[in-house]
Amino acid sequence: MGYVETFMERACRTGVSLGAFMDDSLVGEIHAARLGPRQFNHVLGDLTIAVHPDVQGKGVGSALFAAFFNAAASISPAITRVELTARSGNAGALRLYERLGFIPEGRLVGRVKLPNGAIEDDIPMGRSL
Ligand SMILES: CC(C)(COP(=O)(O)OP(=O)(O)OC[C@H]1O[C@@H](n2cnc3c(N)ncnc32)[C@H](O)[C@@H]1OP(=O)(O)O)[C@@H](O)C(=O)NCCC(=O)NCCS
């Protein structure tokens, strides 16, 4: 099974996966999944969001997060924490996540290698639900 199919299947089965549509076209997606071991059952992790470049900066990402938090609050067993990581050079995403209540919880130095070979840190962030 491919990378996308694997995480979509896990998010749909154990967590939350939502799409944003404009004129019947998918323009954004957000998902997160439970981590597996029972002691983490109250956590949704590996949150990933992407909005089509043509409609970025128009509120789609914020709307997806609002719907995501609502959906996460309604699944069972209850979710009390959401986790994601953001690349240190992705200033726009980091700003958005902090505005939505995510708190930086450390720094994974040199974790991300970009297609051009540059290395960046990864910032783990958490938010209570
Ligand atoms: C990050 C992302 C999901 C935000 O969704 P969005 O629909 O553009 O966000 P909204 O319009 O609801 O909110 C805009 C905020 O998002 C942030 N942002 C991040 N990337 C942005 C972009 N390319 N264009 C505009 N805003 C962006 C900014 O903080 C902006 O707030 P500001 O007014 O303080 O500048 C989206 O831009 C995206 O898919 N980017 C590329 C993929 C990516 O970086 N994913 C996150 C991986 S951790």
Image: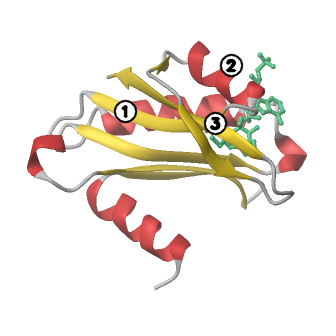
Whether residue 9 is situated above or below residue 93 in the rendered picture: below
| Quarter of image, ligand 1 | top right
Residue 95's tag is: 2
The Cα atoms of the two marked residues, 3 and 2, are separated by 16 Å
- The residue positioned 65% from the left and 48% from the top of the image is 112
Tag nearer the camera, 3 or 2: 3
Residue farthest along the bottom direction in this orientation: 1
The Cα atoms of the two marked residues, 1 and 2, are separated by 17 Å
Q: Is mark 2 within 8 Å of ligand 1?
A: yes
Residue 74: which quarter of the image?
top left
**Residue 35 visible (yes or no):** yes
The foreground one among 10 and 22 is 10
Residue 55's tag is: none
Quarter of the image that includes the C terminus: top left
Mark 3 falls on what kind of element? Answer: strand
Residue 22 place in picture, x, y as percent:
75, 51
Residue 121's tag is: 3
Residue 84 place in picture, x, y as percent:
48, 37
Q: Is residue 69 left or right of residue 104?
A: left
Mark 2 falls on what kind of element? Answer: helix
Residue 82's tag is: 1
